[in-house]
Amino acid sequence: MRLIDLDKAIVFALLHRVWQSVAGVVGLMLIAAFFTVELQGFYYTFSSLLSLQIFVELGLYGVIQTLASREWSRLNLDTAGKVIGEPVAISRLASLLHFVVKWYLVVSLLFAIGVGIAGHSFLSTPSHTAVIWIAPWWSVVVLAMLQLWLMPIVTILEGCNQVAEINRFRFIQAVAEAITLWGLLLSGGELWVAAGVLCTKVASTTLFLTFKYRNFFASLWNRRLQSRIDWRREIWPMQWRIGAQSSVNYLIFCLFTPLMFYFYGAAVAGQMGMTLQIISVIQMISVVWVQTKLPRFGMLAAQKQYSELDKIWRRASAISFTMNVVGSLLMLIAFIVINRSHFSFSNRILDPMPVALFLLANSLMQITGYQAAYLRAHAKEPFLLLGVMGGLLNCALVFYFGSRFGPTGAAAGFAATMGLFMVPFATYIWIQRRAEWQS
């Protein structure tokens, strides 16, 4: 356990990810059994369209977590679950909570209106389809709006180093979501499955925040704000940079399924969506070692304990990348076996070649993720220009090669962007900024 740096937060995070993986396999089998190929395409296109929330959220999650962790370096919880510590730090953290609640109330409403209408227009393109999607789509949009409003509140808790408790909750939540998914699939829920899972997510998050951390938020919300976090000076400079990068990141992560839907139809879009969901399991599990350390990174950077920050970051990144590479190789072997054995399931996923390219691209992308986590702990965002240029380049390559050569072309464009552009330049920026900020 010491060898792979397991602690309570990582154990619960791994339980969450492993359960998601196992439950996801069962869910994929049920989707393949109870969904037509066209219905599967609509289901995964729903997911890609909901990811458009990036364009209204503007990358604020990362800023929230970083700022909260820096204030939490001077705070703690008492036995009743209330925030105690330096009055200035408490007041600044309380002002962050007030800002987040109000900001995301507006953002979530904009999301529901904009994405709801845009998605309705996009999904109407194959007008000949017999799939009933309109009512499920708008139900999903409303529930996603509520979840979008709740998530930054959870992010504040993460920044306050409540990682173990949050990961425990997410494990329980994932179990509830899986049971909902299976039940609705078995009962013939079709696209209402997506709405049911989101309903479970919203209800469980609300209960968790209300009952587990009621005193935490009450002690902040009712606090007189004597000292505030300055949005213009402390939030906006980092937010707009991450926001611009996150908006372009949609072109990196979520373009594939809608692109296949548009050029090749719902069947190929379904294969793309299901394959990417399976591949994402490797990233979800391996990134745990770094993700659970993010509040710690922010606290160490705020205290200028750079040698300890380097030590923890290097160890977490090394374990995470090793897990990613091993998992990717095992997954590729599994895809090859399924493809050559001609299982009935094989017509629902992509061929091994695009899978290998996607796995390679994800492994390379994870390297830039480690570097970004390290630098953002300093409450700065140095990857703006690189992220925007990388996203646009990826969009161009994926669109060009994907429209002409299908999934293999799209995957090749993604891998080329990561390997030939993002990783070399991100590494250069990391070396330069680390030396500059810690000199």
Image (tube, rainbow, N blue to C red):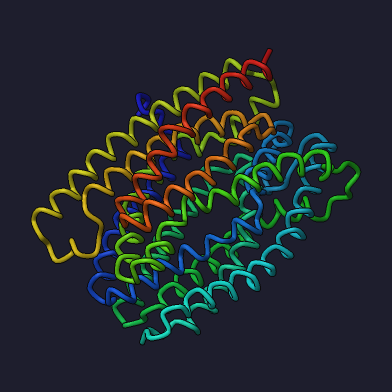
Q: Say which residue appears at 28% left-offset and 49% top-offset.
A: 354
In front of the other: 395 or 332: 395
Q: Nearer the viewer, residue 98 or 266?
A: 266
What residue do we see at 15% from left, 54% from top?
338
Q: Is residue 23 visible?
A: no
Instruction: Identify which residue, 6 or 55, lies in the foreground.
Output: 55
In the rendered view, tell whether residue 410 sits above or below residue 431: below
Q: Residue furthest right?
A: 226
- Within the image, what quadrant is residue 389 found in? top right
* 190, above or below 243, in the image: below
| Count of marks overlaid on the render | 0
> Quadrant of the image for the N terminus?
top left
Q: Is residue 163 left or right of residue 263?
A: right
Q: Quadrant of the C terminus?
A: top right
> Residue 293 appears at what percent x and percent y?
53, 34
Hey, which residue is sitting farthest top in the picture? Answer: 439
Where residue 107 appears, as percent x and y from the top left, is 70, 62
Measured from the top left, where is residue 27 in percent x and y? 30, 65
**Residue at screen point 36% across, 56% down:** 277
- x then y, percent, for residue 325: 31, 34
Residue 73 visible at all:
yes
The quarter of the picture where residue 91 lies is: top right
Horizontal placement of 168 versus 304: left or right?
left
